[in-house]
């Protein structure tokens, strides 16, 4: 499931670094053959929408924002954000 665990950095990083790390982890999972999302009728988020979803999940998890509030602020339904969170958590992302 992706890359090996690395020790946490104590230096502050930019938002883009966090999003880029999440994108690289998803790419690594795709090359390993691990499906990053549950198959279904909806198309997977890509590009700018995926970056926005990763940032919204960061705000929900590490800044204690409410799921419904972050859904309205990001323009992505909270159910979609929570489904991504649950799926990626099960996969170890």
Image (cartoon, rainbow, N blue to C red):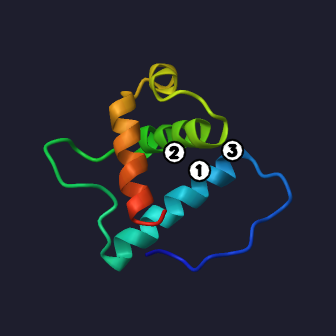
Q: Which residue is mark 2?
A: 54
Image-based side of 46 in relation to 13, left or right? left
* Residue in the image at 52% along x and 64% along y: 24
Residue 78 rendering spot, x and y as whole percentages: 39, 29
Classify 10 Å Cα crowding around label 1: few (below 14), some (14-19), many (20 and above).
Answer: some
Q: Tell me the tag on residue 15.
A: 3
Q: Is residue 23 above or below residue 81?
A: below
Q: Is residue 59 above or below residue 89?
A: above
- Alpha carbons under labels 1 and 3: distance apart: 6 Å
Using the rendered view, name the quadrant where residue 20 is placed. bottom right
* Residue in the image at 43% along x and 23% along y: 75
Residues under numbered marks 1 and 2 in contact, where contact means CB atoms less than 8 Å apart:
yes
Secondary structure state at the residue bearing disc 2: helix
- Alpha carbons under labels 2 and 3: distance apart: 10 Å
* Residue in the image at 30% along x and 75% along y: 33
* Residue in the image at 45% along x and 23% along y: 68
Task: Spot the residue most to the left.
Answer: 41
Q: Which residue is mark 1?
A: 19
Which quadrant holds the N terminus? bottom left
Using the rendered view, name the quadrant where residue 7 is placed. bottom right
**First reached walking from the N terminus: tag 1 or tag 2:** 1
Residue 36 visible, this angle: yes
Q: Is residue 4 above or below residue 68?
A: below
């Amino acid at each position: 499931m992706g890359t090996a665990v690395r020790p946490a950095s104590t230096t502050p990083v930019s938002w883009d670094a966090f999003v880029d790390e999440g994108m690289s982890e998803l790419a690594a999972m795709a090359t390993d053959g691990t499906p990053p999302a549950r198959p279904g009728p909806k198309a997977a988020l890509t590009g700018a929408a995926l970056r926005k979803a990763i940032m919204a999940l960061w705000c929900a998890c590490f800044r204690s924002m409410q799921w419904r509030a972050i859904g309205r602020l990001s323009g992505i339904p909270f159910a979609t954000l929570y489904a991504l969170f649950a799926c990626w958590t099960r996969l170890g992302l």
